[in-house]
């Protein structure tokens, strides 16, 4: 993208310079990266910071992109995606004067991350558990599906929570599950997502939950074409298909990004790992006027109760 | 397991096979024409990618599917024109030219999206052709093109010249036919066909994503080679690839067989095993890769 | 034209074409070409950090460039650098992580590097054997192997090799890690020197040794070489084997000199770019160093000016460079 | 005399090579005109200019009227009744004869190519020449001779004014040559003009009414009256022709068998090939293999050289069985090979002369895993000088040498080797000029005299009769007859060999 440093609204020098590197799928994937971008834009508009973003094209490029931003000694460099974890640790050690934040950060060793690295994690399995329960309660065919992007532990978390949620409310419901592939491209292959979802719908599933980034655009397109229901991920994907998006497992990446920037601006940035779950509103599901016609009030009530149980520790949600 | 088997004998499955196979089929038809004329078509990947890109960008800008498909053909022709200029006119190495075009198309699509829409990985969404197979004009175009290429290659004047020029260009020249003109025609027509194949990668999913071709051009080239440079058979091979993919999706869905990382590899393993146990029987066009 | 005059001519034309197309792309993107080119060069050749990154990018390209050039000289096309690199990097990381503690650094590096070379070589050998003994086109075989290796590597990783929730293997011991070159803030490591040495070795091998001679003759005139009694089949399988080893060294560069572990997607794209590097260098082992540096400058420079021009501009420029090289070599064989 | 059927004057360079330097030719209607000259004299180039296949840098052309050479092309030439049968066949092997004949003039019906009409036209054209052919046969499945006859039928059907035959007899048996000349004669008698490109003087004497000689791209002589073969030869080479080849001394009767071919079958890729050949060549003996091309000689040679598998039978060099041995092992035993196709099997065209020498002599210039470049340089310089290869530049690209010099280089490398036991020479002087041919003949003689067994496969009976102690004829993959000793010197030797070549019993 012409990710030119965008001047802060209002006059004068920016209050901080922020860099962000996107994950595979890129800006406008209408999912994960999109939420991060929204958080950054809000920070730019409300906090008056200058932003620079890079959409890396492939493997070897990613670390170089982060490094490029770090070498400019920006105030904060954000890596969107677990894939940046190891690179962020190393760069944080190399550039102690730069603050780093990693979304979906997963520590690569037993050591504490360096003090200038904030790792932001989400308990996706908790949110997935709730939308799984919603699916289990809403299915008419007693069959639901899951489409993952790349088969990696992070996405397994979504799947595990989702399956547990379905089974919790409907023990004999069937759950199909499929992954788009073995390369990062699996997060950016809507044609493939569409085929995987169609295979599930045609196999009898009437609700499919996707955790596949841009690939999900194909999953949603399949739902639209089939007139079946779909569960979005990361951001509220209702507007991708108002006919069909039952709910979305939202992940407040935008909040996390905005907060990290706000901390830097306010001079209270601190490193360490923060994990956001249902309890922190870091993950959740969407129930509002938009999707009220798809999501019955009973189901919402039941889902809220389950969320309370999870928060209270009465339900242990598996993450793998 | 029964669910898996049952899922294979549905119309939906058939439709899926077709949907997946169309880009391969069209790329392979285009590749066959070009290679039959003696020009190695390693640029299929670029033609698919540019076709997908042009279809999405023009579809979005004009709101017309027809314009999108025409644009895809034009984009394929544009790539083919560079390829022909380099291969036929300048006598450049055809493998090198193809690889370079693939690299360039990859960069150009992302660059253009960045400049025009401020995002390198995705084109803006618009209403494409949907997932229907019978309602998708590309399906019908593809069916017509398979017939046209087969008939064209074996039963028309140009087809005869294309087949001749890939074998003995000197003999064609001695018969008073311009070798360059026949090659240009074959490469450009092939480019248009492969470009339309690209449209199938973006129109059904309502937009273009970077690297939408995802190696399909190379797989299509494999089909061309395995078919012995026969368009009908190449199309069948492509259907087989589509079939393998679709079966694989359903294996995953129904939890049959191997882990997802491995089921995805079935088409590749299949192709390699076939190549290993079934050594090459058909010789390539003799002048393939020779500048003149 | 003599060889040297042709090289100069090619360089000048490639430079002009790159500048013309690049400037056009810059203007379309709304940037001033003068400023953008200035920045591109300043941030790559004018700064220690940037130059270090150029070296870092060029290093694996030398290896994957050689991985294409060697078989190219022997008449085979190696498009399998990606898979060879991946297999090698995984093997290298796993073995390096399992090395007994207390092993002296040079020995650890040597063992890990040898493993990478051998793993890549094994993949290359399989490709070559399929081509020579089964008649399967090496491009098709290599494309298949690339996909299969990527899938199997991820499967192995997910099953047992990745640590924790990551897609990364265990970090290798310090003894196996290559020291950095000390170009502040860059990733350049001593593997850059290794690349120089290996390129020189390959140049010598091609020019002076029996096996290099056999490769060259096989590539230029397979039937004549066979009729003269050269072991052309074996030589071509060996060329692919050595090529796999070269790509394997690129894998070692990433594992030992950069990431200190294997992670999914490591070095992805570098195998393919090696094709362009080798083609630009016309298959000459020493020229590959220069070609790799050109690509390093473009790649790093593109990132440096990404805020003005989409960095994919450099992919287009790399294509332009290769096209110019292809055209200027055009009919010279006649 | 009426206006000529064709008159041309042209200049043409290829890079540094001047192929035509204002070469001129005039052919009258109703005549057969022989165009002679050594290899590389420019005969083919001049004819290709007339036929519109080659551009002239400068020149003029008349085909009944002045032709603008800038707009001239094959289609234009054909439209004016010019037809040409090319020196190297011009059929597309994967197409049928009918498709080949139609190429460029495809009959079309209802938008489609009308294959049946093309086949009918070809059959009719062949019938006019008294030939029968299968229009649906794939060109590549035919022997070269059959291909050439088919091409002649295709071309003759269209040519009305001028028929150009570029060295048409190289692939024909003597009887077939007679038939061809009868046809040529008939064409001329019908008012057409014929250019017969050749450097075989007996053919010139037999059929031509007029003769033009090219040398180094220039027209050096032209006769329309009686002329002797010797005069033509002098004009062709610009001096006295070299003395005829001599035979090596006859080896002793008890000389050891150095090259043994025992019941060998070596099928070709499309069938045919050698069926059952037994041939033993003693040390010091020169054995010739005659035959019309496509009767298994090529497959036999490739099998002996180790370049094609032997289906049945055995091959031995110096008493050692090499049936399954590699090429390298055969060479180590002292087998040398002057291949038929020097472009394909002889030299690596893109490599230097020195590399090409090293290629065949690695045993001498290798030092362990390395190659001794000084040794290569010494050996190359010595070979180039000894065999008069020009230019004597070890760094020159082999492909840049003229055909004759390329062949001299191959012969030098192969026959100037230590430990030579057996020599396989296939068409060693094809396409080589007289002086170079003489050197190659002398060289073959010398290695035989020095004790090597020589198996000489050649099409030219004169060459075989002059050099060989014994000549066998191959027909349909098997040996059809053999002449040795005095029988070779008998006046009916040529006739007997010629009869065997077409499968008749003399
Ligand atoms: N060399 C040829 N000449 C004429 N027709 C051919 C030739 N090869 C194939 N055909 C016919 O053209 C039609 C389409 O050919 P297609 O491209 O499908 O190849 P194919 O099915 O592999 O050919 P085949 O069945 O002959 O092996 C078929 O009817 C086929 O028989
Ligand atoms: N396309 C070409 N490129 C370069 N040189 C050529 C080309 N065609 C012919 N020549 C050269 O031009 C000269 C004349 O060639 P030409 O084929 O006309 O000779 P020729 O008299 O027909 O010989 P031959 O008896 O061997 O057929 C030769 O030196 C030949 O090498
Ligand atoms: Mg068929
Ligand atoms: Mg000639």
Image (cartoon, coloured by chain):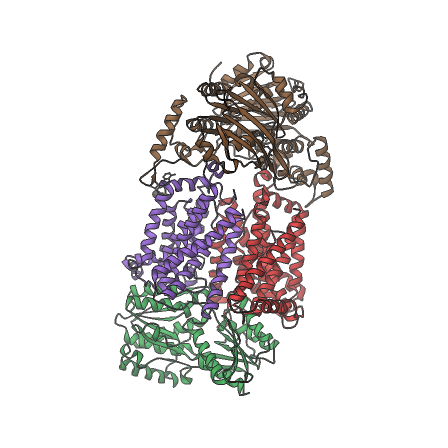
Chain colours: A green, B purple, C red, D brown
Which is nearer the eye, D257 or D433? D433
Image quarter of residue D379: top right
The answer to whether D53 appears left or right of B142 in the picture is right
Indicate which quadrant contains ligand 3: top left
Q: Is residue D365 left or right of residue C97?
A: right
Residue D136: % across, % down: 38, 32
The foreground one among D255 and C138 is C138
Q: As displayed, is residue B279 above or below residue C33?
A: above
Rendered position, A239 above or below D444? below
Q: Residue furthest left?
A: A140
Q: Quadrant of the C terminus of chain C?
A: top right
Outermost residue toward the top in this view: D491
Give the answer, above or below, for where A263 lies relative to D307.
below
Is any atom of residue A315 visible in this view? yes
Is C102 positioned to the left or the right of A61 in the image? right
Asked if residue B37 can be seen in this view, the reply is: no
| x, y percent for residue A43 | 48, 82
Residue D19 lies in what quarter of the image? top right
Q: How many marks?
A: 0
Picture quadrant where residue A290 is located: bottom left
Query: Which one is in front, C143 or C7?
Result: C7
Question: Residue at coordinates 59% horizontally, 32% vertically from top-left?
Answer: D339
Image coordinates of residue D456 in percent, x first then y, are 59, 25
> Percent x, y for residue D27?
52, 24
């Amino acid at each position: 993208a012409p990710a030119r440093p965008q001047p802060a609204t209002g006059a004068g020098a920016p209050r901080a310079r922020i860099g962000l590197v996107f994950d595979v799928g890129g800006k406008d994937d209408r999912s994960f990266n999109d939420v991060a971008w929204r958080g950054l834009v809000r920070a730019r508009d409300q906090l008056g910071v200058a932003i620079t973003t890079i959409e890396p094209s492939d493997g070897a490029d990613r670390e170089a992109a982060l490094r490029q931003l770090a070498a400019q000694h920006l105030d904060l460099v954000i890596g969107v995606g677990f894939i940046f974890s190891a690179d962020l640790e190393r760069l944080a050690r190399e550039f102690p004067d730069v603050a780093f934040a990693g979304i979906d950060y997963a520590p690569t060793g037993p050591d504490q991350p360096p003090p200038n690295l904030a790792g932001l994690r989400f308990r996706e399995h908790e949110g997935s558990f709730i939308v799984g329960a919603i699916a289990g309660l809403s299915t008419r065919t007693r069959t639901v599906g899951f489409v993952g992007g790349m088969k990696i532990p992070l996405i397994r978390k979504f799947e595990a929570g989702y399956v547990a949620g379905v089974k919790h409310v409907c023990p004999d419901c069937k759950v199909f599950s499929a992954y788009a592939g073995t390369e990062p491209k699996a997060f950016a292959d809507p044609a493939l997502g569409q085929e995987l979802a169609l295979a599930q719908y045609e196999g009898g599933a009437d609700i499919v939950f996707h955790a596949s980034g841009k690939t999900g655009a194909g999953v949603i397109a399949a739902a639209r074409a089939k007139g079946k229901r779909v569960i979005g991920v990361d951001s509220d994907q209702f507007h991708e298909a108002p006919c069909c998006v039952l709910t979305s497992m939202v992940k407040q990446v935008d909040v996390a990004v905005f907060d990290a920037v706000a901390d830097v601006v306010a001079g209270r940035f601190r490193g360490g790992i923060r994990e956001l779950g249902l309890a922190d509103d870091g993950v959740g599901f969407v129930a509002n006027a938009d999707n009220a016609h798809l999501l019955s009030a009973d189901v919402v009530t039941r889902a809220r109760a389950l969320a309370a149980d999870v928060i209270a520790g009465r339900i242990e949600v598996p993450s793998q | 397991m029964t669910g898996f088997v049952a899922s294979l004998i549905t119309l939906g499955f058939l439709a899926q096979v077709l949907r997946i196979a169309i880009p391969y089929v069209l790329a392979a038809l285009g590749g066959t024409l070009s290679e039959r004329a003696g020009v190695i078509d390693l640029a299929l990947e670029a033609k698919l990618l540019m076709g997908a890109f042009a279809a999405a960008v023009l579809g979005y800008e004009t709101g017309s599917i027809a314009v999108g498909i025409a644009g895809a053909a034009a984009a394929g022709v544009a790539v083919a024109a560079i390829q022909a200029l380099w291969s036929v006119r300048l006598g450049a190495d055809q493998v090198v030219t193809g690889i370079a075009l693939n690299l360039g198309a990859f960069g150009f699509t992302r660059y253009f999206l960045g400049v025009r829409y401020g995002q390198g990985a995705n084109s803006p969404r618009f209403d494409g052709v949907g997932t229907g197979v019978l309602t998708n004009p590309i399906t019908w175009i593809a069916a017509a093109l398979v017939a046209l290429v087969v008939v064209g290659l074996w039963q028309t004047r140009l087809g005869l010249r294309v087949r001749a020029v890939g074998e003995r260009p000197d003999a064609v020249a001695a018969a008073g036919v311009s070798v360059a003109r026949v090659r240009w025609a074959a490469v450009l027509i092939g480019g248009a066909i492969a470009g339309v194949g690209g449209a199938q990668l973006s129109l059904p999913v309502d937009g273009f994503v970077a690297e939408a071709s995802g190696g399909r051009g190379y797989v299509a080239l494999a089909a061309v080679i395995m078919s012995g440079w026969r368009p009908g058979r190449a199309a069948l091979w492509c259907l087989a690839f589509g079939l393998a993919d679709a079966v694989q999706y359903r294996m995953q869905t129904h939890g049959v067989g191997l882990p997802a990382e491995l089921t995805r590899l079935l088409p590749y393993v299949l192709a390699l095993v076939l190549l290993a146990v079934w050594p090459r029987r058909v010789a390539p066009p003799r002048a393939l890769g020779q500048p003149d | 034209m003599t060889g040297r005059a042709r090289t100069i001519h090619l360089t000048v034309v490639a430079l002009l074409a790159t500048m013309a197309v690049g400037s056009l792309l810059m203007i379309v993107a709304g940037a001033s070409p003068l400023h953008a080119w200035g920045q591109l060069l300043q941030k790559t050749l004018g700064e220690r950090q940037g130059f270090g990154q150029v070296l870092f990018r060029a290093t694996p390209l030398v290896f994957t460039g050689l991985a294409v050039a060697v078989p190219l000289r022997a008449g085979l096309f190696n498009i399998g650098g990606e898979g060879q690199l991946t297999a090698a990097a995984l093997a290298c990381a796993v073995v390096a992580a399992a090395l007994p503690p207390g092993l002296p650094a040079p020995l650890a590096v040597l063992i890990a590097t040898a493993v990478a070379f051998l793993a890549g070589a094994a993949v290359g050998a399989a490709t070559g054997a399929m081509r020579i003994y089964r008649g399967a086109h090496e491009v098709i075989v290599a494309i298949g192997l690339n996909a299969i290796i990527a899938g199997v590597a991820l499967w192995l990783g997910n099953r047992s090799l990745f640590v924790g929730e990551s897609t990364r293997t265990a970090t290798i011991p310090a003894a196996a890690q290559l020291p950095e070159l000390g170009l502040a803030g860059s990733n350049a490591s001593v593997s850059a020197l290794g690349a120089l040495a290996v390129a020189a070795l390959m140049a010598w091998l091609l020019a002076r040794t029996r096996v290099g001679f056999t490769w060259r003759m096989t590539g230029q005139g397979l039937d004549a070489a066979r009729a003269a009694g050269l072991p052309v089949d074996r030589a071509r399988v060996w060329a692919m084997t050595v090529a796999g080893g070269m790509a394997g060294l690129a894998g070692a560069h990433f594992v030992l000199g950069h990431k200190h572990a294997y992670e999914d997607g490591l070095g992805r794209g570098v195998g393919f770019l090696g094709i362009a590097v080798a083609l630009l260098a016309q298959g000459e082992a020493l020229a590959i160093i220069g070609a790799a540096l050109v690509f390093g400058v473009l790649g790093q420079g593109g990132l440096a000016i990404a805020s003005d021009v989409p960095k994919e501009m450099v992919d287009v420029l790399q294509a332009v460079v290769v096209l110019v090289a292809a055209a200027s070599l055009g009919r010279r064989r006649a | 005399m009426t206006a000529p059927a064709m008159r041309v004057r042209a200049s043409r360079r290829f890079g540094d090579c001047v192929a035509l330097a204002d070469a001129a030719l005039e052919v009258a209607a109703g005549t057969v005109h022989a165009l002679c000259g050594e290899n590389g004299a420019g005969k083919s180039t001049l004819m290709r200019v007339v036929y519109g296949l080659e551009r002239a840098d400068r020149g003029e052309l008349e085909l009944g009227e002045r032709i603008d050479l800038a707009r001239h092309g094959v289609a234009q030439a054909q439209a004016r009744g010019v037809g040409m049968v090319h020196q190297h066949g011009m059929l597309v092997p994967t197409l049928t004869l009918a498709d080949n004949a139609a190429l460029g003039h495809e009959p079309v019906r209802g938008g489609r190519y009308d294959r049946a009409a093309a086949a009918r036209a070809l059959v009719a054209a062949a019938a006019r020449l008294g030939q029968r052919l299968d229009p649906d046969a794939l060109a590549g499945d035919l022997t070269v001779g059959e291909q050439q006859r088919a091409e002649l039928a295709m071309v003759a059907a269209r040519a009305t004014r001028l028929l150009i035959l570029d060295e048409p007899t190289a692939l024909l048996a003597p009887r077939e040559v007679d038939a061809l000349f009868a046809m040529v004669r008939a064409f001329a008698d019908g008012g057409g003009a014929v250019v017969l490109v050749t450097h075989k003087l007996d053919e010139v004497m037999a059929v031509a009414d007029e003769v033009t000689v090219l040398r180094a791209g220039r027209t050096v002589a032209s006769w329309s009256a009686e002329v002797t073969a010797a005069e033509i030869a002098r004009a062709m080479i610009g001096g006295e022709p070299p003395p005829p080849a001599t035979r090596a001394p006859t080896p002793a009767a008890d000389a050891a068998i150095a090259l043994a071919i025992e019941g060998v079958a070596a099928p070709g890729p499309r069938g045919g090939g050698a069926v059952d050949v037994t041939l033993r060549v003693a040390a010091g003996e020169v054995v010739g293999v005659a035959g019309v091309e496509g009767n298994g000689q090529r497959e036999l040679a490739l099998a002996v050289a180790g370049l094609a598998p032997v289906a049945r039978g055995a091959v031995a060099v110096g008493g050692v069985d090499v049936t399954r041995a590699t090429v390298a092992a055969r060479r180590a035993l002292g087998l040398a090979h002057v291949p038929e196709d020097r472009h394909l099997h002889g030299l690596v065209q893109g490599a230097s002369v020195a590399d090409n020498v090293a290629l065949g002599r690695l045993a001498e210039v290798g030092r362990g895993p390395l190659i001794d470049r000084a040794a290569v340089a010494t050996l190359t310089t010595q070979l180039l000088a000894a065999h008069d290869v020009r230019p004597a530049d070890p760094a020159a690209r082999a492909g840049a040498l003229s055909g004759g010099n390329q062949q001299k280089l191959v012969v030098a490398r192969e026959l100037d080797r230590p430990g030579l036991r057996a020599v396989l020479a296939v068409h060693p002087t094809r396409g080589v000029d007289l002086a170079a041919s003489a050197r190659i003949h002398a060289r073959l003689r010398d290695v035989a005299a020095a004790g090597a067994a020589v198996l000489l496969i050649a099409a030219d009976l004169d060459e075989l009769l002059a050099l060989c102690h014994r000549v066998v004829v191959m027909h349909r993959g098997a040996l059809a007859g053999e002449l040795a000793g005095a029988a070779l010197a008998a006046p009916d030797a040529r006739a007997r060999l010629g009869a065997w070549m077409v499968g008749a019993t003399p």
